[in-house]
Image (tube, grey):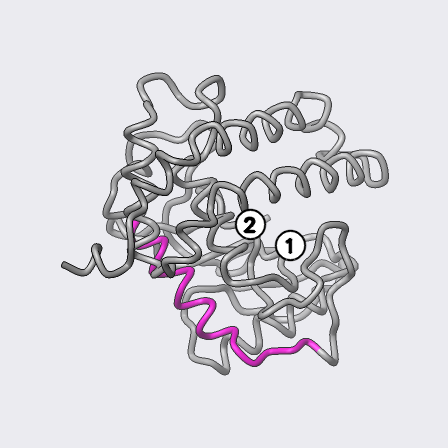
Amino acid sequence: MRVGDTVRRPHQSQSYAVAAYLDHLQRASFDGSPRYLGRDRLGRDVLTFVEGDVAGAVIDDRFLGDDLLASVGHLVRRLHDASAGYLARDEPFPRRIGAEDQPEIISHLDVTPQNVVVRDGRAFALIDFDLAGPTSKFRDSYNAAMHWVPLLHPTDVRTGVELGDQLRRLRVFADAYGWSADERASLPRFGADAASRSWDRMRERAASEGGGWARMWNEGVGDLIRRRGEWLLANEAAIVRALGSPEASED
């Protein structure tokens, strides 16, 4: 709920971990996230409101341009640079199924079009850090590309989006973020493994937490995730070829 220049959100088990992380980002001079202001008299978390546009459930053409996609890659890279060195010792994040065994950083982990604030056609800030936690840079940046390209089986993409469009947009994101040659070559199999982990995580949350997780599971998100993994492997050669190399992207 927006109240003036603030947003009020239900307090959750990870709220203080998120708050400490947002405080770190502020100290690191990262301006692309809200600030945590404490709790109100109703016990809700209070954060600064970030002005701008965000996508709805149905993504319209304003959020499909290559320039915006590239700016998302740049924003995620800036977030990762600002997150370097933050270990979350005082306010650790809850351990989740499918989490990294040796995480590099704390990061957002849910960079969807609905969680990116856009100003003047560029990605300005990230909101909704509820899923933030330990991860690797590649996993978090892959996750952002997965939502923004999008990396989906043809059954699940909007009408008119073809494989060529997906491959071109994936290259735009890869170059903007700065994926290495090894990361580009490993992406299809990495993504298929991520899909398997995501399927396990969604099933577990649907069963243990219910609510929106159960609704998404009942609506078939598990099948969508499995189709994504299969699609990535079926198109592995084309994806790796389209991604090229960092050196080629600089020419």
What segment carries the magenta color? 70-88
Under mark 2, the amino acid is Asp
In the rendered view, tell whether residue 174 sits above or below residue 209. Answer: below
Under mark 1, the amino acid is Asp
Q: Which of 46 and 86 is in front in this view?
A: 86
Q: Position of residue 77 (x, y in %)?
A: 40, 64
Instruction: From the top left corner, tell me how far across and down residue 70 is, in percent.
Output: 29, 51
Residue 242 drawn at (x, y percent):
29, 40
Q: Position of residue 229 (x, y in %)?
A: 56, 32
- Residue at left offset 71%, top offset 27%: 217
Residue at the (61%, 43%) spot, across then down: 193
Q: What element carries label 2?
A: loop
Residue, x 39% and y 55% (percent of image)?
A: 51
Question: On the image, numbered disc 2 is attached to which residue?
Answer: 110
Picture disc at residue 130: 1
- Compared across the picture, whether 138 is left or right of 59 comes to right
